[in-house]
Image: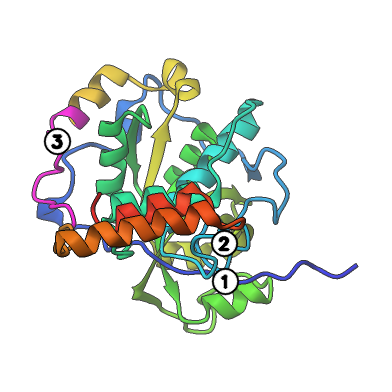
Amino acid sequence: MTNPVRVPGLRGRLPVKPPGERFAIKYVHEYLREQLPAPAYPIDVTGGIGDTSWGMAGNGPDPTCTTYPDGVGDCSFAGELHYKMAKAACYGLDEFWESSNALVAEYFSYDHGQDVGANLADLLLFWYNAGTIKAFAPVDHTSPAAIDSAMEAFKGVYVGVDLTDDADQLFGESQPWTVANGEQPDPSEGHCIVKVKADGSEFDGYVTWGAEQPATRDWSAACLEEGWVIITTEDEAAKVNMDALIADIEALHGTGGNGTPAPAPAPSDPADLLEEIAEAIRSVATSGEKDVTELLAFLASHGL
């Protein structure tokens, strides 16, 4: 039996803000009712989801994404989907997941059609203000024990990394990401993935590009730039002082301090834009291969 082909995808995580512009919220362990126990290795919060059953979610070549089959830089949206999948599997929940087309349309709506990626902190605040997540909090990414305790407790950690230049090759070969040969994280290779496994001694496990990807513990130490937990109903009652966390999130006033949203594209001539919209509607209506999410993505790309 041959192994399934693993195709690396795209990036799309914008850099962490400088210290003076970062969110004034504490690490998640400071909002907990009780201290998390030390990690109990090995940890696996995949919930039984198969190694290659996660889906590309539009973050690279994706035959299920008819609007952008070559992929877009929506790794932050794909990561959130994979995080939700792990939580649902671990908690035994039966959930409906967005299609790749719908996820890409959401990404373009957020990104004003520009495909420039996302800052994870800003995006989490956007989702909170939109009511699509209950809360979020950072994890101390410099502490492997803190990351792994949070992963075990919250069924995953939403992480931002800088990939090494050989990441695509190693992913395609099903080889662990490593820095053993002098590889260095590349700040221009920002990516969002979800941590779902750790053995506590040699390897970690992440979900990205529709599959699980192992990495050495040294790679994680070198390449992780940020870590977050996304709080759900299943988490909050037993673990989190939600009043304190929500108060600190609300104090961000919907902006996160000095962060500014990406500007909308310059408006087109109204007559030309109306004709483009009409053509997009005709294209969807007369095609057996396109659906309304392509029209939504077109509208989002014009700030509509």
Q: Residue at x 66, y 73 (%)?
A: 175
User: CA–CA distance between discs 3 and 2?
Assistant: 32 Å
- Residue at position x 23%, y 60% from top? 273
Secondary structure mostly taken by the magenta-highlighted segment of the chain: loop
Callouts 1 and 2 close, C-beta under 8 Å: yes
The region drawn magenta spans 249-262
In the rendered structure, find residue 8 and report the number of the disc placed on it. 1
Q: CA distance from mark 3 to mark 1?
A: 36 Å
Q: Secondary structure at mark 2?
A: loop
**From the viewer's perspective, is residue 60 above or below residue 36?**
below
**What's the amino acid at mark 2?**
Trp
Which residue is painted at 59% across and 63% down in the image? 62
- CA neighbours of label 1 inside 10 A, class few (<14), some (14 to 19), many (20+): many
Looking at the picture, tell me which residue is in the foreground, 296 or 128: 296
Q: Which residue type does callout 1 highlight?
A: Pro
Mark 3 vs 2, N-terminal side? 2
The image quadrant of residue 253 is top left
The picture places residue 304, in percent across and down from the top left corner, at 25, 49
The residues bearing labels 1 and 2 have C-alpha atoms spaced at a distance of 6 Å
Residue in the picture at 14% in, 64% down: 269
Q: In the rendered image, which residue does mark 2 sit on?
A: 209
What's the amino acid at mark 3? Leu
Q: Secondary structure at mark 3?
A: loop
Q: Position of residue 157 (x, y in %)?
A: 46, 45
Q: Which residue is mark 3?
A: 252
